[in-house]
């Protein structure tokens, strides 16, 4: 009995690890019953009685799911003296720079001169659609414009939007959502 | 040895039991009672779980008053079991291990002792057993003249957010009972099938230095970069023949819609508004629908690819930020009241039909035949795959137990 249980476990592991074949997973044959009588709304089965291509399902995949092309994580940007760069926060559905964020941008600008860095636009959790990603990008672009106006080279700034995919706060509160509507500064 | 295969089959089914939440139930009055019976020679937990899967699918089929109670009966009998003696229809199945990783399944549909339909299936991968249930339900629906259900057998592609800057791309069945991670280790978004056959798919990698759209082969995992853009790169739509794409790119920090020919590699900018233009959707070969905030709030517009004239498509709602098209139909997400709901309009008339009434509903996608709409439903922390059957006015939600759905396609 122990042997059977052990073999079952090993075989189950093989199955669950995705050892699929490239053969069709489901083949089907059908037959109309000979003694079928037609009723309202009922159609007889196909008379072919042969393989039904529509019922053949291909295996999902044999490929490894591990993405080996992914680079290491970005580092938070710091200034020349190690001072942390402040993220820039935004209002709901807005991408214009708030007055209370202008000072932070000025400080960041001074700390990042001469460096190449990336601006990461982020959004709250309300929507995973493209518009939300675009909102994150427009926020990053607004910060980029402000930095360029402050003398930083546009060529030294890359941008990306993570939409709602990079939250710093997971609570369901207005205060938490406000923290997620932000632009971060990252060194490559 | 036989017990080994029974255990194996049992284990594979028990991991992925169907977990359907019926959101809106139509009055079943007047529908014929339909029962499902286990005619397997060896009745074990696995064959009973299969009964649940078939029951869940037949409820989605919506042609019958499905009695979900389990009962066993000799497969060859044309009589229902005693427990189901008042049933009008009996669907009986018999599962037999093939001695490898799969099994043979015989099914028989009986009405008043008359056998209406029989069919035999050979499943070679027991982990995909839920697709067998979908195939059977699809066939029963077709034989009974139900509305098209092609979408039921298709694979669903979704991006699951698992943490900050971390997500997986998953191939699943429509109930999410079967899920297979096909790409992991980075931050991905907007996975979309590249062709109707579902052999390849596009996705955005946000782990590269610049957002990059890749095309990947499902079977081999081989992938190649299609286009990169600073800020944002999304494959929003694929033409019916798979040769044209609508992309959202932002080479200068400005999100706009681009048309891309996958054969010639020709790319042209379709929109040039200084705000946000995203979510391009083909409306035939020369026209697109898209989301733009050009009037102050996100709304749905259309334009011809080679013309600058813009038409507003939706005149209700102040925050319409996502859409999908099928011929003259448009489904869009709108913010009304406390949540986000999906609305449907016909471009040939002025009528608006509200499709959802609870939760945050997002990312609508028409099925290929326009019969159903797939979408993301968020209720509190729970993320679900939602399906709306337009012809029947019914909707279903299937929860994702781990993570949150970012995008979805079928």
Image: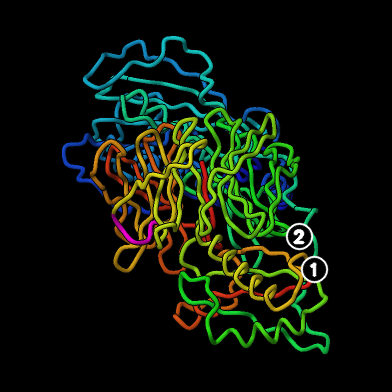
Residue B317 highlighted magenta (yes or no): yes
The residue carrying mark 1 is A188
The image position of residue B15, as x and y in percent, is: 56, 52
Q: Which residue is mark 2?
A: B209
Indicate the position of residue A82 as horizontal and vertical percent values.
81, 88
The answer to whether the residue labelled 1 contacts the one labelled 2, judged by CB atoms less than 8 Å apart, is yes
Q: Looking at the image, which is closer to me, A16 or B107?
A: A16
Q: Are marks 1 and 2 on the same chain?
A: no
User: Which of the chains bears the disc numbered 2?
Assistant: B
Q: Position of residue A50 (x, y in %)?
A: 51, 13
Residue B216 belongs to the span the image colors magenta: no
* Residue at figure coordinates x 68%, y 29% from the top left: B263
- Residue A99 against residue A167 in the figure, above or below: below
**How many residues crowd around disc 1 within 10 Å: few (fewer than 14), some, or many (20 or more)?**
some
- Asked whether residue B356 is in view, the answer is yes
Looking at the rendering, the stretch of residues picked out in magenta corresponds to B316-320
Residue at 52%, 45% in the rendered image: B409
Task: Examine the image and state in which quarter residue B265 appears.
Answer: top right
In the displayed structure, would residue B86 be above or below residue B162?
above
Helix, strand or loop: magenta stretch:
loop
């Amino acid at each position: 009995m122990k042997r059977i249980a052990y073999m079952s476990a090993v075989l189950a592991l093989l199955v669950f690890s995705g050892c699929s074949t490239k053969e069709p997973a489901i083949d089907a044959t059908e037959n109309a019953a000979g003694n079928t009588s037609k009723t309202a709304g009922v159609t007889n089965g196909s008379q072919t009685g042969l393989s039904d291509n529509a019922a053949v399902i291909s295996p999902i995949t044999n490929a490894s799911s591990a993405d080996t092309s992914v680079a290491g994580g970005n580092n938070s940007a710091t200034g020349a003296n190690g001072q942390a760069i402040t993220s820039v926060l935004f209002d709901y559905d807005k991408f214009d720079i708030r007055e209370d964020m202008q000072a932070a941008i000025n400080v960041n600008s001074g700390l990042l001169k001469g460096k190449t860095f990336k601006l990461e636009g982020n959004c709250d959790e309300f929507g995973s659609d493209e518009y939300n990603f675009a909102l994150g990008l427009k926020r990053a672009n607004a910060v980029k414009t402000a930095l360029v106006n402050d003398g930083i080279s546009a060529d030294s700034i890359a941008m990306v939007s993570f939409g709602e995919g990079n939250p710093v706060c997971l609570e369901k509160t207005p205060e938490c959502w406000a923290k997620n509507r932000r632009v971060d500064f990252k060194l490559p | 040895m036989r017990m080994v295969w029974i255990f194996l089959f049992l284990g594979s089914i028990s991991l992925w039991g169907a977990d359907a939440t019926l959101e809106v139930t139509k009055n079943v009055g007047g529908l014929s009672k339909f029962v499902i019976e286990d005619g397997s020679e060896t009745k074990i937990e696995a064959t009973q779980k299969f009964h649940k899967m078939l029951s869940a699918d037949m409820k989605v089929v919506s042609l019958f008053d499905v009695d979900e109670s389990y009962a066993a009966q000799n497969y060859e009998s044309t009589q229902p079991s005693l427990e189901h003696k008042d049933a009008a229809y009996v669907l009986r199945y018999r599962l037999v291990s093939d001695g490898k990783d799969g099994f043979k399944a015989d099914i028989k549909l009986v009405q008043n002792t008359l056998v209406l339909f029989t069919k035999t299936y050979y499943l070679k991968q027991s982990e995909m057993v839920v697709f067998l249930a979908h195939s059977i339900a699809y066939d029963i629906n077709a034989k009974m003249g139900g509305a098209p259900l092609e979408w039921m057998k298709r694979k669903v592609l979704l991006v699951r957010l698992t943490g900050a800057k971390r997500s997986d791309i998953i191939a699943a069945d429509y109930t999410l009972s079967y899920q297979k991670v096909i790409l992991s280790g980075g931050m991905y978004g907007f996975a979309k099938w590249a062709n109707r056959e579902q052999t390849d798919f596009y996705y955005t990698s946000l782990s590269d230095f610049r957002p990059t759209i890749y095309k990947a082969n499902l079977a081999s995992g081989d992938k190649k970069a299609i286009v990169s853009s600073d800020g944002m790169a999304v494959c929003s739509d694929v033409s019916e023949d798979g040769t044209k794409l609508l992309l959202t790119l932002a080479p200068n920090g400005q999100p706009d819609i681009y048309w891309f020919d996958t054969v010639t590699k020709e790319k042209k900018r379709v929109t040039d508004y200084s705000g946000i233009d995203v979510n391009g959707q083909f409306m035939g070969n020369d026209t697109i629908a898209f989301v733009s905030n050009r009037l102050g709030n996100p709304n749905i517009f259309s334009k011809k690819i080679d013309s600058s004239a813009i038409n507003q498509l939706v005149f209700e709602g102040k925050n319409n930020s996502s859409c999908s098209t099928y011929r003259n139909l448009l489904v869009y997400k709108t913010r009304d009241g406390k949540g986000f709901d999906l609305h449907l309009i016909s471009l040939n008339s002025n009528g608006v039909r509200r499709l959802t009434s609870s939760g945050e509903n997002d990312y609508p996608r028409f099925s290929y035949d326009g019969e159903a709409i797939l979408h993301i439903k968020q209720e509190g922390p729970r993320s679900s795959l939602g399906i709306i059957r337009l012809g029947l006015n019914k909707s279903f939600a299937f929860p994702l137990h781990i993570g949150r759905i970012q995008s979805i396609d079928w």
